[in-house]
Each structure stands twice: as C-alpha cells, then as structure tokens.
Amino acid sequence: MPVEALFGISEPGESQAKQICKGRSVGIDLGTTNSLVAVVKSGQPVCLRDGDSSLLPSVVHYAADGSIVVGQKARDLAALAPSDTIASVKRFMGRGPEDAEVTRELTSHRFAVPSAGDPVDPIVRFAVAGGSRAVSPMEVSAEILRVLKARAEADLGGEIDGAVITVPAYFDDAQRQATRDAGRLAGLEVMRLLNEPTAAALAYGLDKQAEGTFAVFDLGGGTFDISILKLEGGVFEVKSTGGDSALGGDDFDRAVAGHLLSAIGLPANAGGDPGVARAVLDAARAAKEALTTANETSVTVALRGGNWQGRLSRQELDGLVEPVLDRCAPPVRRAIRDAGVAVEELSGVILVGGATRMPIVRRFVADLFGKEPLADIDPDEVVALGAAVQADLLASGGRSDVVLMDVVPLSLGLEMMGGVAEKLIHRNTTVPCGAVQTFTTYADNQTAFDLHVVQGERELVSDCRSLARFKLGGIPPMTAGMARLKVTFTVDADGILSVSAREEFTGQETSIRVKPSYGLTDDEVERTIRDSFEHADDDMGARMLTVECVEADRILGATRAALVASSDLLVEGELEAITSAMEKLEAAKAATNHLAIRAAVVALDEASKEFARRRMNAALDANVRGQALDSVEKKVTSR
Amino acid sequence: MLCVHCQAVQPVDPKADFFRVFGIQTAFSLNSEDLEKRYKELTKVLHPDRFARSDPQARRASLERSVQLNEAWQTLKDPVRRAEYLLSLQGVDVGESAGLGKREKSGEHATLPVPPVLLMEVLELREALATAHAAGDAHEVEALIATVRSRLSVVMDDVAKGFAAEKPSLSVIAARLVTVRYYRRFLDEARTLWDQDDSPANARKGGHDAR
C-alpha cells in the first residue's frame, strides 16, 4: 500500500474516543521533594493549586493516634517526630531491605527503617506512628497521590479515572512497577508512566511551539537526568538519555550542611544525632534557597543548647556546590554524543527541577552548552504540565498529530562463547523494538543451547547484569556449526523484554518474558554505564581478544584433527608450511594482540587452503557413495 | 498498514522488505529527508500510544508494526547498514552488521575473505592511535579519526557507485563493505578512548566540542 494512502485515513473518530473515557485524566509529578497535579483545561495544561502553591511537599506524617498528615504540615512535623515522618520516599520505591541499608546511612536523620518485621519481606517498610505501624513506600506514595487526586476532583467537580505519572528516565522496572502500584492503591488508573525529561519537552513543544533538537537538563532533589530530544511536526523523539541517579539538590544541601557543621565545631556526621542533622540540613536548604536571589544570608541552626548564628555568601555557596555540579558534565557529553548531534546544533536547553533555579547551575549549563538555557516554564511545574498533556492525548484515544518516541536506557544482549556479551539491542534504541539473530553450535553433537540474557554496557558477561537464563534442548547431534538457532528479542512500549528462541532444523522452540531492568537499582544502572566507560579500553581489547582466541582455538583444533585424519592427502612441503603457520598462530595468541591473531588465522587459512579443498572433495566423494548405497537400501526395504 | 474500512492496524507481513515498509523503491540511493518524513508519519499512525485503550489484538498488531518500522528505519537510515541489507536480500552476508538484521556467529559459516593488506592497514592505524593516546596527543588522535573518516567516505562513494551501475557486482560491493566494517570498528575504538578521558576534571572545558 502506498504511504500516501495512509495519511488520509489516520484521523481517528474523536467522538468515539470520548465515549470510552468517562472521567477526566490528570498528569502527576510524583517528586522526591515536591509533588504536583496538572490537568488540561480548554486545550492548555495547568497545575492545580491548594491555596497559593501548586507544590505539595512529598512528606507524610503518621501520628500515633492513626491520623495521617501530608504536605507542608507533615514537613513541619519532621523535626519533632523524625521517625514518624517519611520524606524522600521516592528513593525507596521498588527497593528491597538490602538496598535500603545503603540509603539509610545517607538519610538516617530523616526517618527510620525497621529491622523488625517479616524477614522474607522483599519490600522495605517504615516503622511509623510510634512504631505501631509498618508502611511500604508504595503506601506512603499512595497517600501523596490521594491528596493530589482529591485536589483534582475538588477542582474539576468530578471523578478522576486516569492518570499519567512521571518517573525519572533512569527508573528501573521494579521502581516503575512500584510507582504503578502506588497509583492503584490511591484508586487511580495509571495509563502510562512517562519519563520526566520527556514530559518537560512535551510541555515546551506544545506550549512554545518549539521545533528542533533540545536538551532537557533535569536536576531534581535526588536525581540528575539528561535527555536529548528532537521535536518536529508533533513527533517527540528521544535521541538519547543519561544521568546520575545519586546527584541532586539534596547533595548541595549536604555540602552546605558539612560546611555549617565544621563552622559550628561538630563532626561531619553530626555526632549521629538525627535531630541535629535534621536542623543543619534544614538550615542549609534555607540558606541555599535564600542565596538564589540574595548575595549573602544569615544562617540559623536550631540546636538544643540554643541557636547557632552565622552568615553564608553566594560565593561560599558556589564554592561548595561546584565540585558536585561538575559531575553533571560527563553524562551530558555522552548523551549528546549518543544522540549524534553537535552541541552547536542544539536549538535550546530546557531546565527542569528546583535546583536549576540556582544562579550557579544556570551559569554552568550556559557554559556547558554555549547558550542561555530556557526557563520560560516554571522548572518545578513543567514536568506535571507535560504529564497532563500526555494524559489528555492517551485519554482522547489517539490524536495522531502528537506522538512520543522513547528509548531503551541500557543495552540488552546474550552471553556468547568465552563469556562475551553480544548486544542485540543497543541502549538508546527507540521502543518498541526488536532484534533477530542466528547463532550456531560451537561443539560437535551439542544437543542444547544455554541462553543467558544480560543487560549492561560492558563487553564481558561477568560485568553485566544477569536478567534470565533458559535452555533450548532436544537438538539432534550434528557437526558443530550445523544447527541454526534463531533468537528474537522484543521490547514493548513499556520497556518489557520478551525473548524467544527457535532451532531451525528441528523447530524446537522456547520463550520467556523478561523485565529488562528488574531488580537493578538506580545506582546499579548508572554504575553499569560508568564502569563501561572506565574500563572501556580493557573491555574492547578483552572482547576482541576473546573472540579471536575462540576462533584461533577452533581453527587450530580443526587443523590438528585434519592433519591426523587425512595425512595421506598432504603433498610435499605442505605439512611444514601448515605446522609453521600453526606455530605462528600460537605465538600470536600468547602475545595477546587480537589483530595479530586475526592475521595469523588468515595466514593459516591460506597455508591449509589446498589441503582443505582436497579433504572436502574426498569427503564429498565418500558422501555420494554413501548416499547411493543408502538409497539402494531404501529401495530394497520398501519393496 | 491500516485497514481502509475499519482503520485497524493490519498484522505484519513477514515477507515485506524494509523498503516496502516505507513504500519506497528497493534501491541504495534514497532521499533521506523523505525517508525520515515517512518514518515519522508512519510512527504517528502505528504507535502503541494510539491504541492504549483498544482491544488486545489491535494493541498487538500496533506493537508488531512499530517494531518492524523501527527496525526498518534503523537499517535504512544508515548507508552502511542499508548497503549490507541490500546485499543480504540478494543472499550475500557481509558478516557482522551493526546490530540489527540477521547475523551468523562462529561455526563453519563462510565469511568473506579479509585481505591481509587491510588487516595490516588497520593494525598500523590502531598502533598509531594507541601511541597517540598514550602520549596524550589529542591532535594526533583527531587527525587519525579524520583520516579514517575520509577513507571510509571514499569507500562508501564507491559502494554508491557500485549500486548505481547497470549490473552491480555484489562481490565487489561486499568486499568494500568488509573494509568499511574495519574502519567503523577503528572509529568505535577511538570513540571508546574518548569516553575514557571523559572525567569530570576535563569534561567542563571540553563541553563545547563534545562529539
């Protein structure tokens, strides 16, 4: 069918779509520090306010009497009852207790994780309400979502039936699933989880009619995401994504808090006192925010023995923040390079996240990209606005003039002979996507294939994350290389991987559904990528060497066997030439240079070519004779 | 693609080649702007987001077509992969392609011969790269990359001419593509070294010329 014919019929029946959609759909930014809800009203997305603020602090307080407080009031209670007040719950979404152990060190001054409870519980829980209740991160998030849902229903005067909730681009499958569960607990149908930078681009693209290639620089409370997107004719194509999941505004607070602690004369861990840590961090955050507009500010730390008073200048703040901020540069460069664009080609840089309000962050971005960043839309609200737009698009059942194309964050592959990871789907490939590859047997009479699905950027399997193992058996004994195994990878629009394998001769089949980043923590995702760069040179060498050594061993083995089996076919001087080529190959292998090995393999191939041809002819002759005999026998038996 | 009567996405035709997916002629030479335009328009029509509230069959068909469309796009937009794909349609396998499509590994599968001259050339380039990198000579690294890029583009011009000929010689084109593969691998290695140097300390000053 010609392509032109398609365009005319791509207009959907909008009236039909509206019948399916009973209520209204909202966009929710469930943030580490603050959460927001937005909705599209007469074609424009708007954030819904409670009083004069659209921001709902992502803090939940569980009182001993069973009552639950969410938002600013809960934040105010944090200093009084740190363990009954849960802040930054987003860091714990989809995490197990063992993951929380690490995080607890960083946030001990905020809330406690109980060591008691069911030992086989795979979900981290918080002991709240004076220790009488244990709640999961999903339940805590659901409380925040309930408040936002109620706010939207009060504003719209009706029930909310669908929501798009945003997640960091680097959120893994477990974290996404946990976010989905929180939505369900709050009584929301989660139509889609949307990556935060993509949401921001959507808000800019539609509101500002922006076209071109944009970078979204998203520095939130706890994570840093960078995405490169191309906006053109209603198509939002994510070209690449990257980030650092342990980098955010909280790290600036910690840097300032460290400075304050040493000024007060306290140890860097505040003597292990959660109350003091809380007070210093609060003072640090307040000072940081004040210095967004002021050049100098007074600092008050509320201590039990009385208040500590001091001053902080913006220059001092910048000095403390700069080393943390520098860590944003490498992911930015990688994302730009992965997108295949030059910095000068970018049409603009979109700022997202409260931390991008800081003058030093804006200056840093301007230096890095060589242009002033865009902040026309409130960086705190832009993600929620974009989510509202996407919710509206999905609920209306397919306006075809806008489409979002997102990507796979980490490469997916299979383990090959020698422990090398063969990537079938590379990171930053547009989803949905698939790959088909044919493999063959390595050894004679191999009757099964072991398939090991891995994820990561490193070249060796031992350095990648293992996702699944499965076996395809029932293959009849054949010569090495005869069997044909066709492996298919498919990643759907939600990022879920399915793998199927089929042996072409026998038709043996097997398949499995894999969640690509299941169980990977943010930190692990990011470490996987960082490692691959730090070890890149080793890796490339190691991979090529392994590949060539496997090949060299195969050829040496085959040649040795042939020399023994068919010594009668050798002509004068041939044995010496072949043996000499074999020795050179052995020497090249020992020298561990993959190109030299390759060259020696080619030389051996050349030296033994004629011999191989004679062997092939002899085998063919024998085969023809055998077949003739075989057909005679068949005739005899069928008679 | 869509049924004219009910606007349902039709299932994937496994025999359709990637050029037919876009409704263009099966040929090496193509208009890349036109191809991208077609890709985006088809994506708008087929993307699973449009079928978020449809029945499972429609969602499945949309997923399959989108996967096929993305694969076709990845293959055809890149001249090297496009050339390899065209050869594969003729039953000529150039070997390791850049990730998509069919590939055979190890075993007795016949790969195209690699001329020793090419191996020597790449070996020398690679040694020069290692030396320049070890010496911290960024200009030399850049110069080597530029050299290989220009050699690669010369070979790709030959490939284009080869396809344009009245009777294209597949074996000649295939041999050129083997050379291309080695050049690309060299460029990958050079890029890898670049990433390695991407430490926070030198990242700041280098932000403007990141590529």
Image (cartoon, coloured by chain):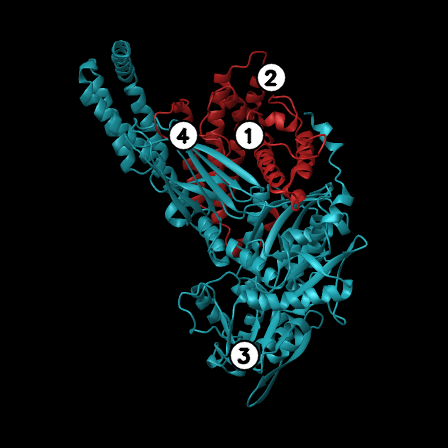
* Element type at mark 1: helix
Residue at 48% in and 20% down: B91
Circle 1 sits on which residue? B150
The residues tagged by marks 2 and 3 sit, at their Cα atoms, a distance apart of 77 Å
Are the residues under marks 3 and 1 on the same chain?
A: no
Circle 2 sits on which residue? B164
Residue at 64% in and 72% down: A288
**Quadrant assignment, res A6:** top right
Q: Is residue A346 left or right of residue A129?
A: right
In the figure, A634 relative to A85: above or below?
above
Q: Chain of mark 1?
A: B
Q: Chain of mark 2?
A: B
Q: Pointer 1: residues within 10 angstroms few (<14), some, or many (20+)?
A: few
Which is more foreground, mark 3 or mark 1?
3
- Chain depicted in red: B
The residues tagged by marks 3 and 1 sit, at their Cα atoms, a distance apart of 69 Å
Quarter of the image with the N terminus of chain A in it: top right
Q: Position of residue A8 (x, y in %)?
A: 76, 32
- Chain depicted in cyan: A
Asked if disc 3 and disc 1 are in contact, CB closer than 8 Å, the reply is no
Asked if disc 3 and disc 4 are in contact, CB closer than 8 Å, the reply is no
Circle number at residue A507:
4
Q: Is residue B129 left or right of residue A195?
A: left
Circle 3 sits on which residue? A129
The residues tagged by marks 1 and 2 sit, at their Cα atoms, a distance apart of 21 Å
Which is more foreground, mark 1 or mark 4?
4
Which is more foreground, mark 2 or mark 4?
4
Q: Of label 1 and label 2, which has the lower sequence position?
A: 1
**Quadrant assignment, res A251:** bottom right
Q: Position of residue A114 (x, y in %)?
A: 46, 74
